[in-house]
Amino acid sequence: MMHRFLLISLWFEAIWLIAVLGQARLQWVTIGLVTVTMAYTAFRYPLGLGRIIGVAALGMTLDYINLQVGLLTFPTPELPIWLIGLWFAFAWFASFAIPFFSHLPFLLICCGTAFGGALSYWAGYRFGAVHFEWSVPGTVCVLFVEWFGLSLLLMKVWRHAHATFQRDTLSERNSLDRDR
């Protein structure tokens, strides 16, 4: 399990690097890698595609709001294509990360996710992929709070989905046992 999660993490980081360092130049490489990743995973593992699309849409909405209020700016006036791909890659990664870390305290997971999300944008800022219109510390603090809220929501959605899956699986098993 640990080995698989390490590979998934490294793959996500590779996609992140290609997206952030390549930006518009490599945006179709990013989209291609995300598409192949999602297709491969859908064939290999049960994948909550609806949740992944929902998380990606939520992340894009959050970045769109950040763009509209002037917190973030990009070289293009709208959300870049590579960022859209990156949100799908993150949602895919989260579908593995949340169950992997679910044994840890809820607050620790939310703080870790918030720190990682804010750090990711700061790194994007340092690489020139995104510009902060507010002060760097102020922007990072706002991003931390946003990612904390996002992680709360993600934990609730994935934990609910996992509990529902477990309950449905157990009830199916019990009904099959009754039929024997």
Image (cartoon, grey):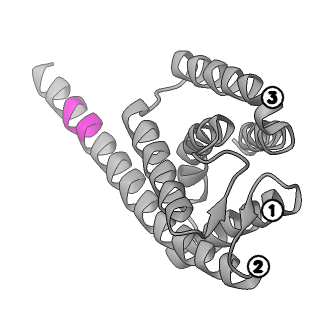
Which one is nearer the viewer's eye here, 71 or 84?
A: 71
Which one is nearer the viewer's eye here, 15 or 71?
A: 71
- Residue 52 shows up from this direction: yes
Mark 3: few/some/many CA within 10 Å (<14, 14-19, 20+): some
The residue located at (63%, 38%) in the rendering is: 89
Q: Quadrant of residue 167?
A: top left
- Residue 108 shows up from this direction: no
> Which numbered disc, 3 or 2, marks the residue that appears first in the sequence?
3
The residue located at (55%, 77%) in the rendering is: 145
- C-alpha separation, residue under disc 1 versus residue under disc 2: 9 Å
Q: Which mark is residue 136?
A: 2
- C-alpha separation, residue under disc 3 versus residue under disc 2: 27 Å
Segment colored magenta: 168-172
Amino acid type, mark 1:
Tyr
Q: Which element type, helix, strand or loop, lies under badge 2?
A: helix
Residue 170 within the segment the image draws in magenta: yes
Q: Which element type, helix, strand or loop, lies under badge 1?
A: helix
- C-alpha separation, residue under disc 3 versus residue under disc 1: 18 Å
Which one is nearer the viewer's eye here, 62 or 170?
A: 62
Which residue matches tag 1? 125
Q: Quadrant of residue 179?
A: top left
Q: Relative to 21, is 76 on the left or the right?
A: left
Which residue matches tag 3? 26
Q: Which element type, helix, strand or loop, lies under badge 3?
A: helix
The residue located at (48%, 64%) in the rendering is: 150
Chief secondary structure of the magenta span?
A: helix
Q: Which mark is residue 7?
A: none
